[in-house]
Structures are given as structure tokens and as C-alpha cells.
């Protein structure tokens, strides 16, 4: 209600929009830093004035915050948010004044309360517009929240000497937030780290264990006036501070800002963690920025991106498992299609590769392994020898085609062996064709991937099985591809049977002979039938 | 009996999962920061950028710097800080991946949509240090007051341009390229006294054109790859070659003893450039334009 009245008073006074522009003209010059953050649920403006004062106005998930305190609500996607985002886009381009005029002139009757709060927040940066507008906005809820958070800190530290929400302590001016004085610092760094403060902060604190600390948390403003002396180490967390007096210890600023006035003096060092420091005074120990990150040179992603450690939701695992299963089926269909083409056009070559890998598996694997090792160096030599550079694409394509022929050849061999051992003689005859072999063999080669996909759906329960299966599947795939490639090379792409078995008829298993009451007649019938049907559709 | 329970339950879970879990989306965040120029006498800039598109150029006179970045806040974090002491500012920008990136989806990740754009004041002396990972970088350093430049790239495509003359004499410019496509144009405008270029694997393109008002030396070293160097015809050029299994092509240069080549105008040219080229595998081509 009060905010509505303020807005009405503003409108009556003719504050918006024209006078605003005139009054901001001078104030914009005083803004030394503008920071804008825009995301799906957040639109934040942070301003810093030349005298060290700063202000943050944030629209986040339907709530308006000024310097972290909740001051009103807005409708996500509504007129206020749209106008605010337009303003921020303009401000991010450096056109603060024009953008501000546009924002103040926008029609936002539906969000009057929040608008009034935002204008209040901006008021200190726009000159002495109105004493009422410049009043600090603080709600009982925000103070309560800050107090509760501070109590958590105090309990975790387990060594709090005094703790109080203060407005004035000794010579210092602290507006809002919390001041904690710590005399016994044992375990403090560990405790702070436990409640989530930055490891760097904890590390710096450990170096200050010999002197008492004064920690100022989430204060709107901290001021050590000229002539005042603080015989402690000062830590400002999410606080904007001004030092015009003397600090005999170190000063650490985390996620805030600090202006050291010309009369300000710090006997120790000033450490900044994600903070802005302006030093116009004296810092005996020097300025230091903490939180240094290892440089990125050649492989920046691996050390910087790590696999998520926490458990995944069940539905997520299910979804991922289904995705893996679909990918495996797609791979099966793709290789099946390619295999069918190879059988149709290059059946003899495929059978030669298949026989080579079956009867000279060790030799094929070693040949393939050697080829994989030599592939890159040979490619590089071809590349650097300019004249042969044109052959590089053909070299790579040839290698890939040989690999494909080899892999399908291995699938063919696997399918053939499976058929031989899985089915009795009459059934085997019906299945004795290369299409069947390839499709069957691919099923064998990809079966482990299917198993891994199924276990991925129940990852928390069968995570070990999934990991085992996926590792086995890739090892099997590599062995198959390597030996297939080697077989393709040994057989000169299936044109030479040097390392393949000599052509022969399928052997009849003993049990089928025993069951056959007329073995000789059956063999006489079976032999030409086998020749007719073998490797045909 | 057991399968009668398991199968419908499984199907229900499948359907639930299919409906409830949308495809993973990237959560984009835009951050813009700018600082007014208020009498700073110098600025040290340090930029670490892991993945995405990067641009750097000269900004408005009234601003010390301006940063604009869009990145996926689920995968990366932007940290920027500014410290000023006795008129010398120190700007640090770091975009790094944080712990909760899921490598399961990384192949579908749209890295190129992330970007960082930095503009710097042209009247403030600058010391510039940049490190890129897998980035596509476009830098126009023309018109700045560069005192020192260090640029390191990983697996990146980097194009550096000195479109205008450097307003300051730079003592040393260092370029280190990993597995990269790396190109620098207008090195004559850089006013660097000593240029150092090293590359791991890839293609280096160095264009020494520009407004030459000084002599310079350049050490160029590449492990494996191609070096294309272009030097202005009016410049006196000396090439000291130390290579292994590298083809060398320098038309218009006269071979001297000890692996040295000289341009014909070496004795008469107003300004001189000494190139020291070394490498292991690849090719070097030096042309005069």
C-alpha cells in the first residue's frame, strides 16, 4: 500500500518520464561500472558509483530483490519484466540514460508496486530525486532470513565470540547484514568450508589464524571512517565497503567491492575473490587476487569438465537406456543394410575375408593392429610430402572401406559359425546364405550393446553390470574391427585366399548321421543341395 | 506370474519416462559488464576462455572495457574481477566449465552458441594475456595501445588482425598455438620489437604487412604443419632456417651460407625483419607481397 502511494506521488509530481532524464544526466557520469545479467528467470542490474556505493536490482522468478532483499513481486513475462529486460539490454550496450528513459516511460500499471520498488532502488544513483525514494527498503522477512543464515555460520564456526545484527559498531558504519567477531579461530576454516563458502576463502582464513577476525556478511554498506583504526583482520562477504581509516590486519573481499579512500590504509594485504577493488590509499602488503585458475593451453575441456558425481533420477536412466537401445538398433539396421549391399555386389570377396578371419584370426588381428598404428603416420607423411597430399582423402576412404568390409566379414564369420553350431543339419541348410550370416553375426557383435542399454535403464541397481557390458562391448567391437581390417588387408580386399581355408563342403555332424537311417543317400542328396543353397538368398 | 507384473510395470516406466523427461536443453545466460574510463593510466587484461566464439576489438573512448558474454550456465561459469591500484587496473575474465557437466550429452552440445566479446579502450596502455581452449577467436587489435601481448590457443581457429597501427610500441608479442588454425594479419602494425610464434600441429599464417616504422625479429617454431609467411616487398628480410623434414619455399630470396636467406634489398631497405624459422615436419612458404 505504501509503495502504491509512493508511485502515485511520483506520478503526481511529474517524475516520469521527462524529469527523470534530466536528473539522470549528471548521475550517469558517476556510474563507474554497470553489470547486467540476463537469463531465462533472472534479469539483474548492478551499478557502482565513483564513491564506492553500489546497488543491485534483481528480478528473479517473480520476485524483485534490491541488494538481495525482497521488495515486491512481478508477473513473469509481464509488462514490468519486458520493460526491465529492454532497459537492461540498452544498459548493457552502454546506453544507460536512453534505456532508463524508455523504462520509466513504459506502461506498467499492472506491476506498480514492484516498479515503485525498482525506482526506489535506482534513486540513489539518479541524484537527489526524493528523500522518500532514497529510503532503505528492508522487510522483516529479509532481516529474518539474513539472521538465520548468520546463525548457521556462527554455529558451524563453533567459535563465535560475539554476533549481532548491527547498525553501528564502534567507529564503523554497517548498514544491514551481520557482523561476526571471531577470537578463537580453531576449526573455523573447516567449518566455513563445510557450509559452502569458497575453498579459497577457507584457505586464506587459515593463514590468519593468529589474529582475530571481523567478518561482515551481506551488508548493504560497510564504512571505516577516516581516523578510525581496526586492529583486526577484516573480511567482507557479499558486501560493498569503503575504507577511509586504518586496518592493521589483512582485508579479504569476497563477492563484493572495496574502495580504499586516499586516507585509507591497510597494514596487511588485500585479497580479492571475485571482487572489485579500487585502491586510492595505501596497502602495505599489496593487492592480491585469489582463486587463480589453471591456464588452458591444449586440452582445456578434460580437466575442466568432470562427470557429474550425484545419482541420476530413475526416469533419466530409463530415458538414456532407451536412447542407447535405439542407437544400437539403428546401428544394426545400418550395418545390416551395408552388409546386404556388400553381399549382393561382392559376395566372393566378403566370403574370402570371412574365411581369412576365421582361419587366420591371430594373423588377421596382428595385421589389423599394425595397420591401425601405422594409419596416422602414413597419413601425415602423405600430407607433408605435398605431391602425395592429394591422395590423402583416397587413403582415408580406402582405409574406412577396408574397415567396413572387414567388420562385415567378421559378422559373416560369426554368423556362419553360429549357424553351424546352433542349428541341426536340415535347419542349417535353410540358413546357409550370406545374408543370414551377416545379419546373425551383427546381432552377435551388437548383443553386448543391447545388454548394456537394458542395464542402463536400471543404472543405480545394475550400474556395475552396465559398466562391465559397455566395456566388453567396445572391446569386442575393437577386436572385431581390427581383425576384420587385418583380414581385409591380408586377403587384398577379399581377392586372395592365401590365408583363408581351402574351399570345402560343410561337414556333417555326427549326430545327424546317426539319426539318418540312410546316411549315404542323405549325403548324396545333401551335397548338391548344400552347394546350391550355400550363400544364396 | 512375475513377468506379468514386470512387463506392464516396465512399459509404464517407459511411458512415464518418455513423457516426463524432455530433451536436455542448454540454459543460456547473458552477462554484460562495462566500466567507465576514469583516468586509469594502464590496464592489465587476463582472459581465459575455454569453449565458444571469442571477439576482441577497440571499444568506445569513454569506456575502459566492456564485456558481453552468453554462455550455458549449467555447464560454464563466468568470473570477472577488476582491481585498481594507483591508476593501474587489472581486469580478469574467466569462463570455465564447472563440475556438473554431463559428458553423456556432450556430443550433442552446441558449444559454438556460447560467446564472449570484449572491447577495450584505445587510449589506455594495455598488457594483454589471453588463453583459449576450443574456441573460434577473432581479434582486431588495431588502434589499441598494446604494450605487451601474450596469446595462447588450444584446439582453436584463431584470426588476429592489426587493422590499425598500434598506438604504443610493444616490446614483445607472443603467440602460442596448440592444434590450431592460426592466422595473424598486419603484424607490421603491431609495432612489436620481438615476435614469438610457436605452433604444435596445424597451419600458421603470418602476414607482416602494415605500417613499418621499426626493425623487428620474429622467432617462428612449428612442430608439424604448414607455415605461410607473407612479408612486404619494401622490407629487408633475413631468414634463418633450422628445420627437419620441412619443405622450404622462399622465391625471391638469395641463399647464403649457414641456412640463411636474404632478400635482395637487405642492404638498402629502411627497416629490417629477421625471421628465425624452425620446425620438424611440414612445409614453409615465404612470399613477398
Image (tube, coloured by chain):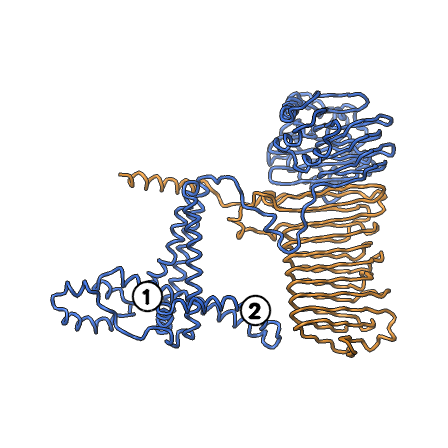
Chain colours: A blue, B orange
Residue at image location 38% in from the left, 76% down from the top: A498
Residue at image location 44% in from the left, 56% down from the top: A474
The answer to which image quadrant residue A122 occupies is top right
Chain on which label 2 sits: A
Label 1 secondary element: helix
Label 2 secondary element: helix
Chain on which label 1 sits: A
> In which quadrant is the C terminus of chain A drawn?
bottom left
Residue A482, given in percent of the width and then of the height, sits at 44, 64
Tell me the mark number nearer the camera, choosing from 2 and 1.
2
Residue B6, given in percent of the width and then of the height, sits at 32, 40
Q: Is residue B281 visible?
A: yes
> In which quadrant is the N terminus of chain A drawn?
top right
Which class describes the residues within 10 Å of circle 2: few (<14), some (14-19), or many (20+)?
few
Asked if both marks, 2 and 1, belong to the same chain, the answer given is yes
Residue bearing the label numbered 2: A377
- Disc 2 + disc 1, Cβ < 8 Å: no
Which class describes the residues within 10 Å of circle 1: few (<14), some (14-19), or many (20+)?
many
Return the mark for residue A95.
none
Q: Is residue A369 above or below residue A127?
A: below
Residue A318, given in percent of the width and then of the height, sits at 42, 43
Q: Is residue B8 above or below residue A358?
A: above
Residue bearing the label numbered 1: A435
Q: Is residue A101 visible?
A: no
Residue B161, given in percent of the width and then of the height, sits at 74, 60
Of residues A262 and A248, the one drawn nearer to the viewer in this rendering: A248
Of residues A73 and B64, the one drawn nearer to the viewer in this rendering: B64
Mark sitting earlier along the chain (2/1): 2
Of residues A44 and A107, the one drawn nearer to the viewer in this rendering: A44
Question: Cα distance, mark 2 to mark 1?
Answer: 37 Å
Left or right? Give the position of B97 relative to B258.
left
Amino acid at each position: 500500500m505504501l509503495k502504491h502511494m509512493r508511485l502515485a506521488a511520483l506520478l503526481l509530481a511529474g517524475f516520469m518520464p521527462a524529469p527523470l532524464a534530466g536528473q539522470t544526466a549528471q548521475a550517469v557520469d558517476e556510474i563507474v561500472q554497470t553489470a547486467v545479467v540476463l537469463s531465462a528467470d533472472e534479469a539483474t542490474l548492478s551499478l557502482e558509483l565513483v564513491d564506492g556505493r553500489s546497488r543491485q536490482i534483481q528480478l528473479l522468478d517473480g520476485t524483485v530483490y534490491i541488494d538481495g532483499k525482497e521488495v515486491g513481486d512481478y508477473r513473469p513475462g509481464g509488462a514490468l519484466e519486458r520493460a526491465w529486460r529492454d532497459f537492461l539490454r540498452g544498459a548493457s550496450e552502454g546506453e544507460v540514460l536512453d534505456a532508463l528513459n524508455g523504462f520509466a516511460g513504459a506502461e506498467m500499471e499492472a506491476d506498480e508496486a514492484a516498479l515503485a520498488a525498482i525506482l526506489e532502488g535506482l534513486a540513489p544513483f539518479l541524484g537527489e530525486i526524493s528523500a522518500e525514494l532514497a529510503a532503505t527498503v528492508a522487510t522483516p522477512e529479509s532481516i529474518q532470513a539474513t539472521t538465520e543464515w548468520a546463525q548457521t555460520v556462527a554455529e558451524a564456526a563453533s567459535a563465535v565470540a560475539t554476533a549481532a545484527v548491527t547498525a553501528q559498531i564502534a567507529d564503523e558504519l554497517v548498514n544491514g547484514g551481520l557482523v561476526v567477531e571471531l577470537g578463537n579461530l580453531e576449526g573455523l576454516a573447516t567449518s566455513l568450508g563445510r557450509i559452502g563458502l569458497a575453498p579459497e576463502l577457507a584457505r586464506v582464513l587459515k593463514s590468519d589464524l593468529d589474529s582475530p577476525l571481523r567478518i561482515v556478511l551481506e551488508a548493504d554498506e560497510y564504512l571505516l571512517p577516516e581516523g578510525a583504526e581496526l586492529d583486526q583482520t577484516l573480511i567482507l562477504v557479499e558486501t560493498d565497503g569503503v575504507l577511509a581509516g586504518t586496518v592493521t590486519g589483512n582485508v579479504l573481499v569476497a563477492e563484493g567491492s572495496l574502495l580504499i579512500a586516499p586516507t585509507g590504509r591497510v597494514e596487511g594485504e588485500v585479497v580479492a575473490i571475485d571482487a572489485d577493488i579500487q585502491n586510492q590509499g595505501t596497502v602495505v602488503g599489496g593487492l592480491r587476487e585469489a582463486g587463480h585458475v589453471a591456464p588452458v593451453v591444449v586440452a582445456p575441456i578434460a580437466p575442466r569438465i568432470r562427470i557429474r558425481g550425484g545419482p541420476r533420477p530413475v526416469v533419466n536412466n530409463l530415458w538414456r537406456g532407451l536412447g542407447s537401445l535405439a542407437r544400437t538398433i539403428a546401428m544394426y539396421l545400418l550395418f545390416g543394410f551395408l552388409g546386404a549391399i556388400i553381399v549382393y555386389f561382392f559376395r566372393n570377396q566378403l566370403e574370402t575375408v570371412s574365411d581369412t578371419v576365421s582361419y587366420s584370426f591371430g594373423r588377421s588381428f596382428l595385421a589389423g593392429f599394425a595397420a591401425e598404428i601405422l594409419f596416422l603416420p602414413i597419413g601425415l607423411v602423405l600430407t607433408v610430402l605435398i605431391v602425395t597430399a592429394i591422395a590423402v582423402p583416397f587413403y582415408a576412404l580406402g582405409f574406412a572401406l577396408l574397415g567396413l568390409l572387414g567388420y562385415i566379414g567378421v559378422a559373416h564369420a560369426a554368423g556362419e559359425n553360429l549357424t553351424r553350431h546352433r542349428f541341426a543339419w536340415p535347419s542349417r541348410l535353410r540358413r546357409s546364405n550370406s545374408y543370414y550370416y551377416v545379419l546373425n553375426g551383427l546381432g552377435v557383435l551388437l548383443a553386448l550393446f543391447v545388454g548394456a542399454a537394458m542395464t542402463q535403464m536400471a543404472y543405480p541397481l545394475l550400474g556395475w553390470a552396465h559398466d562391465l557390458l559397455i566395456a566388453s562391448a567396445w572391446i569386442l567391437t575393437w577386436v572385431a574391427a581390427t581383425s576384420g581390417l587385418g583380414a581385409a588387408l591380408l586377403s587384398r580386399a577379399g581377392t586372395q585366399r592365401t590365408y583363408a581355408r581351402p574351399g570345402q563342403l560343410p561337414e556333417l555332424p555326427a549326430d545327424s548321421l546317426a539319426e539318418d537311417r540312410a546316411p549315404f543317400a542323405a549325403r548324396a542328396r545333401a551335397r548338391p543341395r548344400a552347394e546350391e543353397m550355400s550363400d544364396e538368398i | 506370474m512375475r513377468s506379468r507384473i514386470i512387463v506392464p510395470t516396465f512399459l509404464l516406466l517407459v511411458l512415464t519416462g518418455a513423457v516426463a523427461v524432455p530433451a536436455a536443453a542448454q540454459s543460456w545466460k547473458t552477462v554484460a559488464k562495462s566500466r567507465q574510463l576514469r583516468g586509469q593510466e594502464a590496464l592489465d587484461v587476463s582472459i581465459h576462455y575455454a569453449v565458444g566464439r571469442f571477439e576482441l576489438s577497440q571499444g568506445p573512448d569513454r569506456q575502459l572495457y566492456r564485456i558481453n558474454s552468453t554462455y550455458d550456465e549449467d555447464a560454464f561459469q563466468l568470473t570477472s574481477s577488476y582491481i585498481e591500484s594507483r591508476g593501474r587496473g587489472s581486469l580478469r575474465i574467466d569462463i570455465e566449465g564447472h563440475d556438473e557437466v554431463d559428458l553423456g550429452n556432450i556430443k550433442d552440445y552446441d558449444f559454438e552458441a556460447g560467446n564472449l566479446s570484449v572491447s577495450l579502450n584505445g587510449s589506455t596502455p594495455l598488457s594483454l594475456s589471453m588463453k583459449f581452449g576450443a574456441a573460434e577467436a577473432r581479434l582486431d587489435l588495431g588502434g589499441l595501445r598494446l604494450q605487451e601481448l601474450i596469446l595462447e590457443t588450444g584446439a582453436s581457429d584463431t584470426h588476429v588482425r592489426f587493422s590499425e597501427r598500434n598506438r604504443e610500441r610493444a616490446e614483445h608479442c607472443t603467440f602460442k598455438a596448440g592444434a590450431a588454425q592460426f592466422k595473424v594479419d598486419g603484424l607490421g602494425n603491431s609495432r612489436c620489437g620481438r615476435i614469438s610464434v610457436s605452433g604444435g600441429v596445424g597451419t600458421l599464417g603470418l602476414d607482416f604487412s602494415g605500417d613499418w616504422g621499426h626493425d623487428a625479429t620474429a622467432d617462428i617454431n612449428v612442430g608439424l604443419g604448414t607455415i605461410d609467411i607473407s612479408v612486404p616487398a619494401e622490407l629487408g628480410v633475413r631468414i634463418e632456417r633450422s628445420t627437419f623434414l620441412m619443405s622450404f619455399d622462399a622465391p625471391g630470396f638469395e641463399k647464403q651460407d649457414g641456412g640463411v636467406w636474404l632478400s635482395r634489398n637487405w642492404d638498402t631497405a629502411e627497416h629490417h625483419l629477421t625471421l628465425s624459422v624452425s620446425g620438424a615436419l611440414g612445409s614453409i612458404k615465404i612470399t613477398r607481397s
